[in-house]
């Protein structure tokens, strides 16, 4: 049984997001002052910043300069609980803030915006997912981190893309059959690699789903010496062309260590900040998306990640707006599956 719950990005959201970029680019001078103010408050109040690789490069830079954590969702999940700060500001999408709260319930977790969500999270409502799980009572429930706290509370395991393969491989070796949600492309990739018995929820990431096989093949012809780096949320026809398939941190590590000089990258373009910073002598090209004719007009840029801005980061730091608050019972139940991920290996 499969359900079709892929939510598309509302046009109004994309418009709002584009307007925000224009407004910010006109305020470069005042933005410098705002960045200084952010830094002063963060230092004075011992706030810990955690930011995802897909956020605005300016947010990643501020986080690095303040000795915060810029990483993928697995490291983000671990970082909040390790930090000795009582207040943590998570720039990313909502499930990342929720994960930080579940793992550190005694801390104050703030986000620049609570509107930033994820098509995978939206496409897997907890009530529908509960019914789906009840149809397969003999299966181990493994959910991707890009889900709500309520969905995590229904799961046996939470995984991120950097650990999903190993966890499923381990469960398969224990003779377990798996119910996987919500990303069907990542799930198919893992099933192909591990040969595990997996039933899939029908969800997808609106950003990665837009990478196209034919367009990528044309780009490979133009750059035959380039290595192809692909996030496994992409369709299998794109994954099939990859030299390296991995999470954001695995793709970054591969580019850092590889002897290749050119790379074509199929994931959110926020990753280019880290790729270019670490490898200024190497060339990086964006893998082609379907562009304006497609279901997602963002062209390899997550519209929800893009809702994190310097202005709303400042608001979060100064006014402590947008605090994550979750039901205690849900937090307790979701913690079990999250702890399994954090303590795996
Ligand atoms: S890039 Fe895709 S998976 Fe990541 S937050 Fe955006 S919609 Fe979700």
Image (tube, helix red, strand yellow):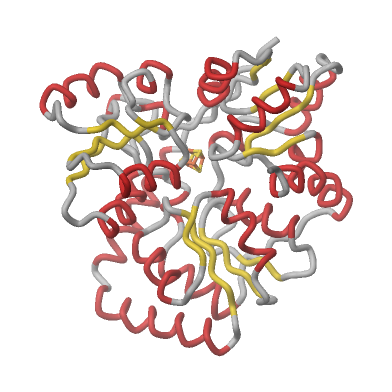
Name the quarter where the N terminus is drawn. Answer: top right
For image coordinates 48% across by 69% down, the residue present is 313
For image coordinates 42% across by 63% down, the residue present is 309
Tell me: 225 left or right of 325: left
Where is residue 282 shown, x and y percent of the image? 18, 48
Across the whole image, how many numbered discs are drawn on residues?
0
**For residue 33, what is the image quadrant?**
bottom left
Query: Height in image: 3 above or below 268?
Result: above
Where is residue 232 shown, x and y percent of the image? 46, 29
> Could you tell me if residue 258 is visible in this image?
yes
Name the quarter where the C terminus is drawn. Answer: top right
Tell me: 191 left or right of 293: right
Identify the residue at the far left of this view: 222
For image coordinates 64% across by 64% down, the residue present is 80
Query: Height in image: 328 above or below 84?
Result: above
Identify the residue at the far top of this view: 1
Observer-nearest residue: 245 or 14?
245
């Amino acid at each position: 049984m499969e359900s079709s719950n892929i939510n598309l990005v509302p046009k109004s959201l994309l418009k709002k997001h584009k307007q925000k970029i224009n407004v910010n680019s006109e305020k470069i001078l005042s933005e410098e002052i705002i960045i200084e103010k952010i830094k002063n408050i963060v230092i004075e109040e011992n706030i810990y910043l955690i930011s995802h690789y897909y956020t605005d490069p300016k947010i990643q830079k501020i986080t690095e300069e303040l000795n915060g954590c810029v990483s993928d969702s697995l490291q983000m999940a671990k970082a909040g609980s390790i930090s000795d700060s009582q207040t943590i500001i998570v720039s990313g999408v909502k499930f990342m803030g929720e994960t930080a709260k579940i793992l550190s319930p005694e801390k104050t977790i703030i986000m620049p915006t609570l509107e930033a969500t994820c098509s995978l999270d939206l496409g897997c409502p907890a009530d529908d997912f509960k019914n789906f799980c009840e149809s397969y009572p003999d299966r181990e429930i493994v959910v991707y981190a890009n889900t709500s706290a309520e969905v995590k509370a229904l799961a046996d395991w939470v995984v991120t893309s950097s650990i999903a393969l190993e966890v499923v491989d381990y469960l398969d070796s224990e003779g377990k059959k798996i119910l996987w949600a919500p990303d069907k492309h990542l799930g198919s990739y893992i099933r192909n690699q591990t040969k595990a018995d997996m039933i899939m929820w029908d969800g997808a990431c609106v950003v990665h789903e837009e990478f196209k096989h034919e367009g990528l093949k044309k780009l490979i012809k133009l750059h035959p010496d380039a290595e192809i780096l692909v996030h496994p949320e992409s369709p299998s026809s794109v994954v099939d062309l990859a030299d390296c398939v991995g999470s954001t941190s695995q793709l970054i590590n591969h580019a850092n260590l590889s002897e290749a000089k050119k790379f074509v990258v199929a994931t959110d373009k926020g990753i280019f900040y880290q790729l270019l910073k670490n490898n200024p002598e190497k060339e990086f090209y964006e893998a082609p998306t379907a562009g304006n004719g497609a279901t997602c007009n963002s062209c390899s840029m997550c519209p929800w990640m893009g809702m994190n801005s310097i202005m709303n980061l400042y608001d979060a730091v100064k006014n402590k707006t947008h605090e994550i608050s979750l039901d205690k019972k849900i937090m307790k139940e979701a913690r079990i599956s999250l702890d399994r991920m954090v303590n795996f290996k």
